[in-house]
Amino acid sequence: MTRLTYYKLFLLGVLLTGFNSYSQELTCKSFKNGTFIIPADETLPFSIRVVRSGNYQSEIILNPEVIDAENPELRKKAFEIIKWIDDCSYRLIYDETKMVLDEHQKFVNDNGGLLVEMIKIKGSCFYYISSLTLDGEIISVEGKICKIKPSLNN
């Protein structure tokens, strides 16, 4: 083997090892801890920053100026408890020990919380279906949440 061929093989090995080390695919488990953004879209007129650690998360609206002035409760930080069903699905309820619940939050909790199911991961985002059962009828909304800051716990 010539010196040039050996060098090319060595370089290829280093590159493949580097790509394998730095381009690991995210899994559902990658979204259990960290800081995330739920971006505004056609159904959600504002972006939300989510800070998640295991079974707890907090949410704060990043652009509160788009919220109707008649609903100031939405401008407050929200605290939730996550009840993991498996790595890709969980139930979210509002934490009444850390905040006073508004009518919407009480309604969500009284109806078993929001069921969130991750349906696909693309880049640093997961796409989900969030649903609530009301009088036997399932009401669902699709969305995405994107990881913006890695956590030491994942």
Image (cartoon, helix red, strand yellow):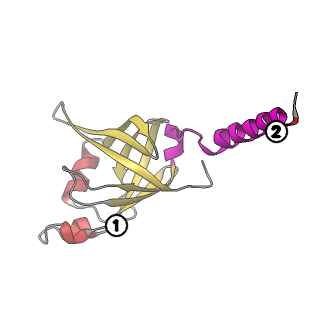
Residue pictured at 26% horizontal, 56% vertical: 40
Residue 88 position within the rendered picture, expressed as x and y whole percent measured from the top left: 45, 35
Most common secondary structure along the magenta stretch: helix
Residue type of the residue flagged with mark 2: Tyr
Tag 2, which secondary structure? helix
Numbered circle sitting on residue 77: 1
Q: Is residue 10 magenta?
A: yes
Residue 98 position within the rendered picture, expressed as x and y whole percent measured from the top left: 39, 64
Residue type of the residue flagged with mark 1: Lys
Q: Is residue 5 above or below residue 123?
A: above
In the image, 111: left or right of 20?
left
Mark 2–mark 1 Cα distance, whole angstroms, equals 56 Å
Q: Is residue 115 above or below residue 74?
A: above
Numbered circle sitting on residue 28: none
In the image, 108: left or right of 54?
left
Residue pictured at 57% horizontal, 55% vertical: 151
Task: Quickly name the residue at label 2.
Answer: 7
> Mark 2 or mark 1, which is nearer to you?
2
Q: Tell me which segment is drawn in magenta.
A: 4-32
Packing grade of label 1 (10 A; few <14, some 14-19, many >=20) is few
